[in-house]
Every structure is written in C-alpha cells, then in structure tokens.
Amino acid sequence: MVTAIAAAVVGLSALVAATTGDDAHPAGATPATETATDGATSTPAPAPSPAGESAPAPPQTVTGLIADLTARPDAAGPAGSLLRDGLQGLLSGDEGVRERSALQVLPIVISGQGLDPRYATATRLALFRTMTGLAPAPSAPTGPPSCLQVGRGTPPAEVQNYAGQIVDQLPAWQADGFPADEAARLQELLTPVTDGRATLDLVPCSGG
C-alpha cells in the first residue's frame, strides 16, 4: 500500500504523464531501496563539483530534470542515474511502475545520498512544491490534481515515518540550498503528523 506522500508523487506523475505521453520505465532500472520505510541507500556520498567549472543550474521540474539527466547523466552525482530512472518511471502509464518509482525516488530525495546538492534541492522543490499546491500542476482529463493536506486522525506508521524523515532532514536540506521559507512551510505541514496528532490526506489542489 503506497503511503500518502508516495501516493502524491504518483498522482503528480500521472498529471505529468497526461501532458507528456507515456515514457516507459527503463528496463535496467532497479529500486534504490527495498522498503518504503528504509531511508538509507547504498549509494556513496556525492562527489564535489570540479573547481572552476560553472555548471548550469538544474531544472526544477520533473520533465526538465529527466531531460537534463538524460543529456548529462553524470551531472547529479553517483545517484543521478537512479534519480533519472525513478523520475522516468513516474511517467509510466502503468500505475504499479509509478508506485514503485515513487518509493524509489523518495528515499534518494529525502536523504540526498549520492546526489549533487543542487540536484537534490531542485528535485525536492519540483516534487514538494507541486504536491503541496504551491506550484501549478498540469490539468488532467481524469480530474483535478491532488495535493497533500493535513487531516484529522492518527497517521499510518509509514506516513508518520516519512514525515519524520523529512522534518529531521530539513536542516541538511537548507545547508544544500533548500529555501528557508519552503523548509518552514514543510515543517509546519508535517510536524503534526510526526507528533501523531494528524495525518496526511490527498485532496484536490486549490484552483485545480
């Protein structure tokens, strides 16, 4: 059962796929982690950018990141290919592939292990801005885009675990370049979930 956070990633990917067409998940891609609750990956720490080089800033959209990582597969660091394959899987027409890809992408995005900090930040912004309704999502014939919203109730263990991982990582995210206002917004959204006082629901995005 995919969690609310992963489900939101899947919902976002369905919207993107509706406007870009079905991109099959690469046959050689494998999940970065076996379980949704295991935040650790086996990828090494990100390699520093070569001194003196001024690389272009990574895109802050899912489709833009895929195109960039396809053209420059080593740009994001050792885990860049896993990130690219996972993002490509989010555009699959197969819901099962999208779910597996969401669970592949989330641990990489949360931990940032093996990613250049700029790409970790760009991916976090691309996913979480859209999932929380800050960035516009493309419309889809199946209905309005879905966003995360705090709801009353006790959160499932997996949802609480993911929320806790994100809140715990926010200082490291900010050190990598994640904007302070975005971090504060995520902390406000997720803290009641990590405390067990609320859960996360998928609802139609405002204006969607």
Image (cartoon, rainbow, N blue to C red):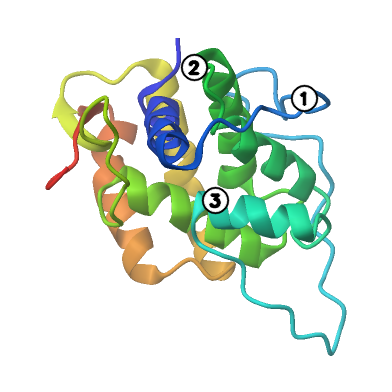
Which quadrant of the view contains residue 40?
top right
The CA span between labels 2 and 3 is 18 Å
Which quadrant of the view contains residue 14?
top left
State the quadrant of the N terminus.
Answer: top left
Q: Mark 2 points at which residue?
A: 95
Residue 178 placement (x, y as % from top left): 48, 66
Residue 118 placement (x, y as % from top left): 63, 67
Is there CB contact under 8 Å for labels 3 and 1?
no
- 145 horizontally vs 156: left or right: left
State the quadrant of the C terminus.
Answer: top left
Helix, strand or loop for disc 3: helix
Above/below status of 133 relative to 59: above
In the rendering, which numbered label is found on residue 30? 1
- 8 horizontally vs 142: left or right: right
Is there CB contact under 8 Å for labels 2 and 3?
no
Q: Disc 3 or disc 1, which is closer to the eye?
A: 3
Is there CB contact under 8 Å for labels 2 and 1?
no
Type of amino acid under label 1? Thr
Q: Residue furthest bottom?
A: 52
Residue 169 placement (x, y as % from top left): 52, 50
Type of amino acid under label 2? Glu
Pick whichever of labels 3 and 1 is earlier in the sequence. 1
Q: Which residue is drawn at 54% across and 13% down?
A: 96
In the rendering, which numbered label is found on residue 109? none
Q: Mark 3 points at which residue?
A: 63
Q: Callout 2 environment at 10 Å: few (<14), some (14 to 19), or many (20+)?
A: some
Q: In this view of the protein, can residue 36 be seen by the observer?
A: no
Pick whichever of labels 2 and 3 is earlier in the sequence. 3
